[in-house]
Amino acid sequence: MHTFDQFELVDELQATALGATSVARLTEGGGEFVVKAFCPSPDLMSEAEVGRRAAAFLDRVRIQQAVVQSGAAQWAEIRDAGPIDGGAFYAVARYPFSARKLIVGRARISASDLAQIVGGIAEGLSELKRFCGRAHGNLKPSNILLEKPRGSGTIRVRLTDPADAQHAAGAGAESEDLYALGRLLFELVTLRPCSGAAAWPVVDSDLWSRLGPTAQRWRELCSWLVHPCPEEGSRNLDQLHRQLLTLAPRRRRSPSARVLAGVARDDARAAHWFGEAAKLGDPVAMRNLAGFYEAGRGGLARDLGQALTWRKQAAFADDEESKRWPRAHPH
């Protein structure tokens, strides 16, 4: 085991010539974390090159910190980061799943879970664009962290590891992120690798049909995302969000929404409980929380970015009013 800063490494998950990803725990306190370290073999590159790449590594970390501090809900919070001898590191909380684990484990994903995963990724990409004006540039299954709290039907998505700025700028970068999302969607449903242009157009199969009434729309969405030569500017986040609104899972109104209605007259209490219920996946609470952020009610600072985030989450959770909201409030 190796110890640096406040973390003790207890299990190595992956190692390459450029560094390692490890499970870690605090030297004082509890909780499990994942530490990603850039620490190349000494004979691989010069000391100057190590310094340059370590600085770029920490620049990427700062991008992730900036989007989280701006109020993003779909990004993993950096617990610690900094230089180490011969490189740099960062640490995030350990999440029980990643999209890569689902693919490697050949997990069968329901249409409802698929909508939450793809919707969460789409919202995370929109948060990065809104707060930092750029694309991800490094969207791959291992950089999509997932958790499903016990007793909750909600899957929480947390993105991580954005690319260097030069690899995530320009109109083409957003389209490449969505292409990567399409490959992920293909692999989650078909349980096989997406073989580039050969996978387009996506053909029907029993694996798509098991998604139920929305199966054809999911397959059409995947074909749109993995199109090898889309028209310039046509594969974009706005269009993706419009298509996802038609794929939101059907849910009954939960008891928490009715309970919350009783405290709605007390703005501060309502803001608190709307927030708690929204985190547990209640669509009506999500919509009401969005309204509180839009108006700056209940002790919440007015924040249109947070309002938009919760509006979209409510729409993904099948809140009919939030689904109509983009048409009623065109941008």
Image (cartoon, rainbow, N blue to C red):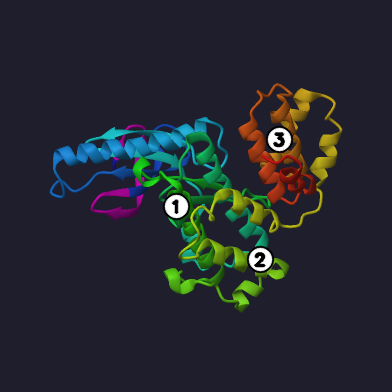
Residue bearing mark 3: 290
Mark 1, secondary structure of its residue: loop
- Nearest the viewer among 60 and 25 is 60
Q: Which residue occupies the extreme front position in the image?
A: 231
Horizontally, residue 162 falls left or right of residue 325, namely left
Residue visible at 70% across and 34% down?
Answer: 275
Of the image marks 1 and 2, the number of the one nearer the N terminus:
1
Which dot, 3 or 2, sits closer to the camera? Answer: 2
On screen, residue 101 above or below 31: below
Q: CA distance from mark 1 to mark 3?
A: 28 Å
Give me the residue at 81% from left, 41% from top.
Answer: 257
Residue 175 horizontal/vertical position (percent):
48, 53
Residue 303 in percent (x, y) is at 64, 28
What are the residue bounds of the magenta stretch?
A: 3-20
Q: Amino acid at mark 1?
A: Leu
Residue placed under numbered mark 2 in the picture: 217
Name the quadrant containing residue 292.
top right
The answer to which of 124 and 262 lies nearer the viewer is 124
For label 3, the SS is helix
Mark 3–mark 2 Cα distance, whole angstroms, equals 28 Å
Circle on res. 139: 1
**Residue 281 in sight here:** no
Report the quarter where the N terminus lies: top left
- Asked whether 292 or 90 is in front, the reply is 292
> Would residue 204 appear left or right of 318 to someone viewing this image?
left
Which numbered tag is attached to residue 259? none
Q: Earlier in the sequence, mark 1 or mark 3?
A: 1
Residue at 48% from the left image edge and 63% from the top image edge = 183
